[in-house]
Image (cartoon, rainbow, N blue to C red):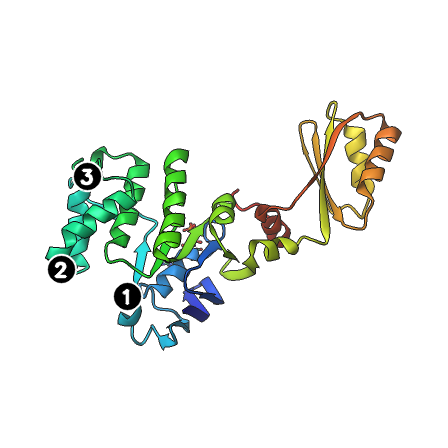
Amino acid sequence: MLEAVELTKHYKQQKAVQGINFYLNQGEIVGLLGPNGAGKSTAIGMISSLIIPTKGEVRFNQVDVLKDPQVLREKLGVVPQELALYDDLTARENLEFFGQIQKIKKQDLKKKIDEVLIQIGLDDQEKKLVKHFSGGMKRRLNIGAALLHEPEILIMDEPTVGIDPQSRNYILETVKRLNQEKQMTILYTSHYMEEVEFLCDRIYIMDRGNIIASGTKEEIKNILSAEQTVKVKLEIQHQGFIDRIKQESVISRVDVREQWVTIVAPKEVPVFSQLFQFAEETGAVIHGIEIQTPTLEDVFLHLTGRALRN
Ligand SMILES: Nc1ncnc2c1ncn2[C@@H]1O[C@H](COP(=O)(O)OP(=O)(O)OP(=O)(O)O)[C@@H](O)[C@H]1O
């Protein structure tokens, strides 16, 4: 349905996006995941015709959107990262304003606003001035403004940044509902792994202007299937035990947090028996041991050597 081909944006020295390829199928929720500065907002800006690419194409149902932006504009809703709201207007007045900009017919607008206020859970707050709204309520209204013209595709740029967990859950549930009930296709940008894991059918992971991994959650996690992660709980933190593990060159990573030691090693290494042997050698007491299934965070760490948020 929507496709980006070799999409590139360079700002003088800054290679913000370096020839990325991706697609959205109708009815999917697709995650675009990456740390700050990865190039997510720039990529979204190019898809929504707000940023002119240095190179590359955006196609909507095979039509070149860069040559003919109108084909996509009326089908697309964009929720920007920055709040675009008027503090001195009420929730309803804000939506009226955005509805007029979007040229929604006056006779349809009231009904549309009623519906959107229910969708974003602000129908009982519509007369309140936005300056009295919490951060989460503002984020929800920001989403509402993008829903007024009933877009087929919704692009959301980090819609949960800086809000309380309750509002965050509400937004995540709203995104799921829009997808399930309205069959809306959604591109969801975030640097929160768990949001993308919860919402998305497929995921693209971006870092430094490139897509470094893509696929379903399972496919991406399979990148790590050659490795195992084992977590050991010691009676107390034991330096001799930790040093002994670190001497083993086959072990790819050791992390220590209080009395917990996390070990990453290739699948074929018999980590369990080795750990008990090391404990015996060093006098460490093991209180528990567990195998961890990889998270997307682990995949990101594996691919880039960095945590997603640091
Ligand atoms: N107008 C601009 N001029 C110069 N450099 C820019 C411009 N816009 C973005 N950049 C740079 O391009 C890179 C990608 O930025 P972008 O905002 O797309 O990242 P992001 O993944 O959306 O990050 P965030 O999560 O912080 O929004 C960054 O290094 C940024 O500083």
What kind of residue is marked 3? Glu
Quote the CA–CA distance across marks 3 and 1.
27 Å
Q: Which residue bears the numbered disc 3?
A: 126
Q: Is residue 259 left or right of residue 85?
A: right
Left or right, 262 with respect to 197, comes to right
> Nearest the camera: 306 or 84?
84
Q: Is mark 3 within 8 Å of ligand 1?
A: no
> Does the beta carbon of the residue at mark 1 sit less than 8 Å from ligand 1?
no
Image quadrant of ligand 1?
bottom left
> Which residue is under mark 2?
105
Secondary element under disc 3, as helix, strand or loop, is loop
Q: Earlier in the sequence, mark 3 or mark 1?
A: 1
Residue 70 in the image: state x and y as whole percent: 26, 70
Residue 272 appears anywhere in the view: yes
Cβ atoms under marks 3 and 2 closer than 8 Å: no
Which residue is identified by label 1? 73
Q: Residue at the location (14% across, 50% down)?
A: 110
Q: Position of residue 252 (x, y in %)?
A: 74, 47
Contact between labelled residues 1 and 3, with CB atoms less than 8 Å apart = no
User: What residue do we see at 62% from left, 53% from top?
Assistant: 221
| Left or right for 87, reference 237 | left
* 27 up-or-down from 62: above or below: above
Of labels 2 and 1, earlier in sequence is: 1
Residue flagged by tag 1: what amino acid is it? Answer: Arg
Q: CA distance from mark 3 to mark 2?
A: 20 Å
Would you call the spot at circle 2 few (<14 residues within 10 Å), some (14-19), or many (20 or more)? few
- Image point (16%, 40%), residue name: 90
Task: Pinpoint residue 78: horizontal percent, then vertical percent.
Answer: 32, 56
Q: Quadrant of residue 286?
A: top right
- In the rendered image, residue 133, in percent from the top left (x then y), is placed at 25, 35
Which residue is at the far front? 181
Give the residue type that dot 2 points to: Lys
